[in-house]
């Protein structure tokens, strides 16, 4: 179950299109239509994923959380994601941080992705949030 608490008046740092472009530069594939249906909804819409093994649940949840942070402007500390095991929680956290930093690096490396965005502000703000979360202070 994923619950979020968006801050009033916060806006995203990048568009959903920019998010997907950056993700496809660091991933071997683009999310399929079912995954995009899971990732796309507004930050105020809760998400509950039930699926069998090896169906992409963790990938969907990872991308949804990164979309909430980068596109919707939801602070990481206001996102609640639950799993059934500590191992699954550790894997989810690892993927969020790993893919999150790789997406930020892709955005920084390719100025065409961030044509209408202040990339320096994006990198400083989000990288600081990720670092804080990684160290357990966020």
Image: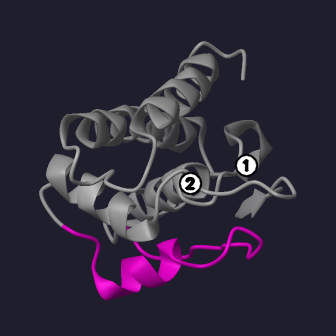
Q: Residue furthest right?
A: 8
At horizontal 44% and vertical 50% (from top left) the residue drawn is 117
Residue 4 percent location from the top left of the image: 77, 58
In which quadrant is the C terminus drawn? top right
Residue 78 percent location from the top left of the image: 79, 45
- In the rendered structure, find residue 65 and report the number of the disc placed on it: 2
Q: Is residue 49 above or below residue 22?
A: below
At horizontal 67% and vertical 16% (from top left) the residue drawn is 136
> Would you identify the image quadrant in which residue 65 lies?
bottom right
Depth order, front residue of 94/127: 127
- In the rendered structure, find residue 79 and report the number of the disc placed on it: 1
Q: Is residue 45 above or below residue 26?
A: below
Q: Residue 137 vs residue 55: left or right? A: right
In contact (CB < 8 Å): disc 1 and disc 2: yes
> For the magenta stretch, what is the residue range?
30-53
In which quadrant is the N terminus drawn? bottom right
Q: Is residue 49 above or below residue 60?
A: below
């Amino acid at each position: 179950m994923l619950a979020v608490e968006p801050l009033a008046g916060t806006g995203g740092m990048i568009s959903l299109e920019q998010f997907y472009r950056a993700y496809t530069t660091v991933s071997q594939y683009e999310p399929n239509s079912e995954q995009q249906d899971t990732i796309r909804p507004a930050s105020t819409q809760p998400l509950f994923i039930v699926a069998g093994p090896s169906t992409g649940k963790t990938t969907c949840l990872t991308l949804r959380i990164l979309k909430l942070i980068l596109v919707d402007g939801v602070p990481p500390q206001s996102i609640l994601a639950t799993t059934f095991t500590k191992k699954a929680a550790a894997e989810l956290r690892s993927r969020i941080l790993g893919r999150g930093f790789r997406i930020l690096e892709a955005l920084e490396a390719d100025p065409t992705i961030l044509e209408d965005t202040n990339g320096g502000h994006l990198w400083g703000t989000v990288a600081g949030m990720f670092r804080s979360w990684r160290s357990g202070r966020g």
